[in-house]
Image (cartoon, helix red, strand yellow):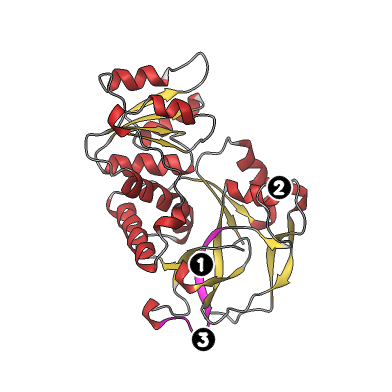
Amino acid sequence: MAPVPRTMKAVQIGKTGGVEVLEYKDLPVPSPKENEVLIKNEYAGVNYIDTYFRTGLYPNPKPMILGREGSGAIAALGAAVPKSLRFSVGDQVVYMNTSAYAEYTACPADKVMKIPNGVSLSDACAAFLQGLTALTLVEEIHKVQSGDWVLVLAATGGVGGWLSQILRAKGAKIIGTVGSEEKVAIAKEQGADVVVLDRPGHGDVLKTVKDYTNGEGVAAVFDGVGKVTFERSLDKLSAKNVKVARPTLVNYIYTREEFEHYSNKLWKMMVDEKLTVRIHETYPMEDIARAHTDIESRKTMGKLLLKP
């Protein structure tokens, strides 16, 4: 690889606010600590949570470089990176950690995963956080069986789209909800057997669930919307499946063994099941304000990526 420069381009915020606080600027390239690797980013993922840090909804020390996931190549290794991880300079990797909106990111080695042959850098970045979230929900929260009827709310959303594809691969029967007409076809393409336009004056989600499950309700509701739909979600569950969980991905990939298990399972499903990686747009990093504006509009379909 080329020598690591002293400075890099990055997106930093020094205060909270609207997109005007996003500063595309020159900053020093970080030096990896003993247990870290330095990654030359090829892509960084844009997630709605990034806007929470920008606006101050989630407090965080300032200044800070935004971004929670990225993919690229290892540019340098810290002195104490475990040999068991088998990392080398030049390896193509993906990671979940802070400060991804930058040309270079120093990341704890145990938060980094090699990308296998058959998965591109862009697909790995677009799939990693949301795909792992969906996979752990299906595996840990409710072990979905072939033939189960399940309800996926916001079926074309970031996690919802992955849930639909993974559930389809497991043989589940899926009722998906969407918020606009143009999303109906996409929801079906991603695996929904039945799609309901969940807007006043349109589809009746509860009636649809009862009709398709002979009045019993679904085995599981995967609700990525939250407060607005929570109580309505309970109405659609089968009586024997009333269980409420508010899961967090990090709890299911807490150990290195768990992280590797679910990452490798995701890669295998992407290749073997030919899961679709839907990328809304790849933005030049200097267009970060437009990317944040677009994701806050809630009109995007698919992952938003930054290209440093």
Closest to the camera, between mark 3 and mark 1, is 3
Q: Which residue is mark 3?
A: 79
C-beta proximity under 8 Å, tags 3 and 2: no
User: Marks 3/1: CA distance?
Assistant: 20 Å
Kind of residue at disc 2: Thr
State whether residue 123 appears in this view: no
In the shown orientation, is residue 2 left or right of residue 150?
Answer: right
Q: Residue at x 41, y 50 (%)?
A: 131
Q: Nearer the N terminus, badge 3 or badge 1?
A: 1
Q: Which residue is mark 1?
A: 72
Q: Which residue is mark 2?
A: 55
Start-end of magenta stretch: 67-82
Kind of residue at disc 1: Gly
In the shown orientation, is residue 145 left or right of residue 139?
Answer: left
Image quadrant in which you'd find residue 189: top left
How crowded pointer 3 is (Cα within 10 Å; few <14, some 14-19, many 20+) is rated as: few
- Expressed as whole percent of the image width and height from the top left, the position of residue 40 reads 56, 71
Closest to the camera, between mark 2 and mark 1, is 2
Q: In which quadrant will I find the C terminus?
A: bottom right
